[in-house]
Amino acid sequence: MSEIFDVIVIGSGPAGYPAAIRAGQNKLKVACIDEWKNTDGSFAFGGTCLNAGCIPSKALLESSELFQRAKDEFGIHGIKLGGITLDLGAMQKRRASVVKTMTNGILALFKANGVVGIQGHGRLLPGNQVLVTAPDGSENMLQARNVILASGSTPIRLKSVPHDGKAIIDSWDALELDAVPGRLGVIGAGVIGLELGSVWRRLGSTVTMLEALEQFLPMVDQTIAKEAQRHLKKQGLDIKLGAKVLSAAATSGGVDVVYADAQGEHTLQVDKLVVAVGRRPFTEGLLAEGTGVELDARGFVQVDEHCRTTVPNVWAIGDVVRGPMLAHKGKEEGVMVADLIAGQFGEVNYKVIPSVIYTTPEIAWVGQTEEQVKASGRAYKVGAFPFAASGRARAMEAGAGMAKIVSAKDDDEVLGVHVIGPMAGELIAEAVLAMEYSASTEDIQRTIHAHPTLSEAIHEAALAVDKKMIDGINR
Ligand code: FAD
Ligand code: AMP
């Protein structure tokens, strides 16, 4: 007789592990299965986010920014340092240790919440059975009242750009390089491409980014995107828009990349080429014949707004289902599903999901862009405040960028908040909370913000919406 669980979660990324923890908090008998294996051969919970995504990328972004600031900015503060050199080995060791601390943290959280963590491959069989194949090949059949699929996503590969893990690499490989490439090519100037390009540019690579679209960051408010493009160009990122990569081949000296733009075909020679053209849902080996779980045309597990699949008591969350591929979106879905299973209230507000790009300056937004509001036909008003006028930003030598708010003309509701500037990813939390409570611009205007803080930029942007800005000139 197989062991019976109330909930079995397949995948322990930022969608799966919170689902398991909340199920444990809800006093359900829960197991969480994951097969993730790191490049050093160790197994780990935490999925892409902790092992090969959010956390290692932020560790390297932080280190590389400090390196670049020590070289280019400390002098402005009157700090004279000589002989600044890079010890990439030490930087990578720190990155790996940050990851290890976080993934070990999940083990501790599982223990504290009564979650049975299982290392191995999980496969859903008809009748809510889950076949677990352990790393040594042994098999174990588990039975669940509810199964949550949280198998995540994997990098999209281009057929004509064959991945070899050495010269032609993906985002995971690009986080673990042990030498700074002289010339780095990046296909795709999306969020991941820009973050990786920034890391290696700061550490000394000549970076060329090839982006098929003519428009830079089309999902971002275009005032902010234009500002970002200007700053990133100044930092030395060569972003070629309208440049579609046709093929690439590893050579003895690196990689030859063939791309086409309005002028015709070109060949770019680089030492390493990162393919960062997006991610696709990962369902390989997840579903046995006859489970009844349906995928949509793009390979995502089909779910309703409460993450119910086409099969009763089988749920799916995170990158493997529709919606933005973001860790915090998956986390909220995981918590919602674990609460719904326990008979409690559960809801995700898909309209108010923040996005952050961890470049310098940082870019963060929530809600609709000005372009989207305009296209919707709703009358709107806009206010913006430049960080150049923020005392705190100036004191930090970080006066680039702005905060911008788009509000409805009729009832003053905040429709979108867009920030490019220092700590934008932290600043956006206030806007998310405001929008979660359907705040009006006036609500933000009447909220006291500490001085001198970066958050005053959000306050002033709200004032600017009604031409009541104090620290800037209203236009
Ligand atoms: P995943 O994290 O992909 O986890 C899925 C897990 O399921 C994996 O551990 C996998 O081994 C396991 N699994 C799959 N199938 C099976 C099976 N059959 N049996 C057992 N185990 C299985 N998002 C942000 O919000 N902020 C960021 O700053 C950010 N930065 C990123 C940087 C990079 C370089 C990358 C690549 C991604 C980044 N993301 C970021 C995206 C984020 O990592 C994903 O949105 C998030 O990891 C999705 O979580 P998930 O739990 O759905 O899937
Ligand atoms: P994201 O989906 O944010 O990770 O971004 C991936 C980016 O890669 C998108 O902006 C795509 O337009 C871009 N892209 C996809 N295929 C190609 C290609 N063959 N050449 C250049 N850019 C590409």
Image (cartoon, rainbow, N blue to C red):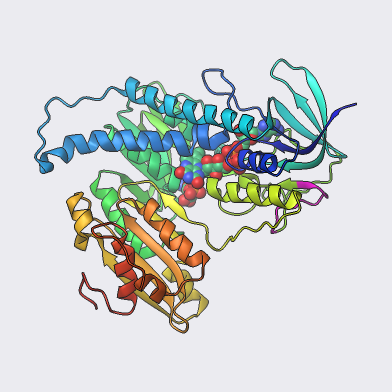
Q: Closest to the observer: 196 or 145?
A: 145
> Where is the N terminus found, in terms of image quarters?
top right
* Identity of the residue furthest to the right in this view: 1
- Image quadrant where one finds the C terminus: bottom left
Nearest the viewer among 18 and 472 is: 18
Which residue does the image show at 33% across and 21% down from the upper left? Answer: 90
Q: Residue furthest bottom?
A: 410
Q: Is residue 78 visible?
A: yes
Q: Quadrant of residue 85?
A: top left
Left or right: 419, with 336 as reference point: left
| Viewer-proximal residue among 387 and 250 | 387
The number of numbered badges drawn on the structure is 0
Vertical placement of residue 186 versus 330, above or below: above
Residue 152 position in % (x across, y down): 62, 40
Question: Residue at 19% of width from left, 35% of height from top?
Answer: 70
Quadrant location of residue 427? bottom left
Q: Does the magenta stretch include residue 446?
A: no
Residue 311 falls inside the magenta stretch: yes
- Please name whichever residue, 466 or 369, is drawn nearer the observer in this view of the structure: 466
Q: Residue at x 81, y 47 (%)?
A: 313
Residue 378 in the image, given as x and y percentages of width and height: 49, 80
Q: Quadrant of residue 461?
A: bottom left
Q: Position of residue 251 (x, y in %)?
A: 42, 24
Query: Residue 161, how many percent across, how many down?
Result: 51, 35
Range shown magenta: 305-314
The answer to whether residue 366 is visible is no
Q: Main secondary structure of the magenta part?
A: loop
